[in-house]
Amino acid sequence: MTDQDSQGAHHQLPLVSIAIPVFNEALNLPALYQRLSQVAESMKDRCRIEFFFSDNSSSDQTWEIISQFAKSDPRVRGIRFSKNVGFQRSILANYLHTQGDAVMQIDADLQDPPEMLEAFFALWQQGYDVVYGIRKKRKEGVWINQFRRLGYWMINAISEHDIPRDVGDFRLVDRKVIHAMSRMKTPNPYLRGIIAGLGFRQTGIEYERDSRVAGESKFGLFRLIRLGLTAVLNHSSVPLRMASALGCMMIAVSIIGTIYFVILKLLAPDLPRGVASIHVLVLFGIGLQSLLLGIIGEYILRIYLILRAEPIAIVERSINLEPNELVL
């Protein structure tokens, strides 16, 4: 086989994009790049690989390190956002800029092993459009683990479609899945729910999640709660129906209470008026109405954000991308 034939055969191999969203991960990038390069070398006879970084406006040396990688490795491509757009939007923006026939998303902290690309890739070639990692074991505290499990259970219980439990954003998706996601107008995406709701042929692989190699986690308890609320409000109409049900219940209680007090007044005309009970009922009614209005307001806010049609992210700088390749 001539050199031209071998080059032609190489270009016929599928392109796999490894999408890496990063935010202040300068300490982890050298080890990550080394392991990704080893994976690419071991799979060079099965696919071509590009490394695509999306920098969520880091304040450390993250972007400079990525730029150094790109100087000696044309497989490294990247974008830097003009501001921090959040983790889920960062992933989506990364997906939309990749060119691969399949895209594997992985965090930069090396808690998810890059070497699982080989298993993901094998299942993708068997016809699966989505292959995700199922966290069999996490090296975290007992309380945070139980909190996550409870959150996953609640989200799945009230969601309009099944969302796999103990599954994060460590996955490989086919290009047609990304194309379908690009047509959805969601200002605050919850990608696990979006991908689960799209259908396609999906499967998972169990694995044990490692501890973070360096740096600090950007996902504390508050952000977990915010992500959970996004999941619920984006993929379930249960809160709205719950608001309607509570309203009907309060009307029923009010009618029963009215009948009770009318009968009581007829039987005991001299009974003193219950000022305290009236105050309690009024305050309870105000609190309930505020809660229901807040739930409705959250949905109206999401409608407003969709109508405002802001871009997912604004790219401030790019590496190894032509101007016509910037889609946001």
Image (spheres, grey):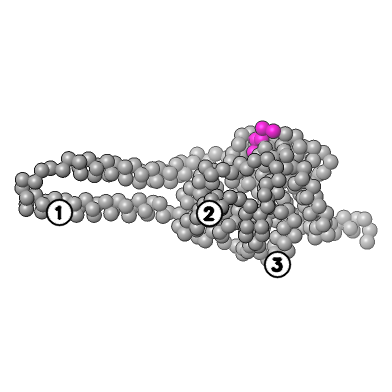
Task: Say which quadrant the C terminus sits in.
Answer: top right
> Is residue 286 among the parts visible in the rendering?
yes
Dot 3 corresponds to which residue? 126
Give the structural element (helix, strand or loop) at label 3: loop
Rounded to the nearest angstrom, the CA distance separating label 1 from label 3 is 67 Å
Q: Amino acid at mark 1?
A: Ile
Q: Tell me residue 3's x, y (percent).
A: 92, 55
Q: Amino acid at mark 3?
A: Gln
Compared across the picture, whether 239 is left or right of 235 comes to left
What main secondary structure does the magenta stretch of the protein show?
A: loop
Q: Which residue is mark 2?
A: 146
Q: Nearer the viewer, residue 45 or 6?
A: 45
Q: Of discs 3 and 2, which sits in the foreground?
A: 2
Earlier-in-chain disc, 3 versus 2 = 3
In three-dimensional space, the C-alpha distance between marks 2 and 1, rounded to whole angstroms, equals: 46 Å
Q: Which mark is residue 259?
A: 1
On-image quarter of the N terminus = bottom right
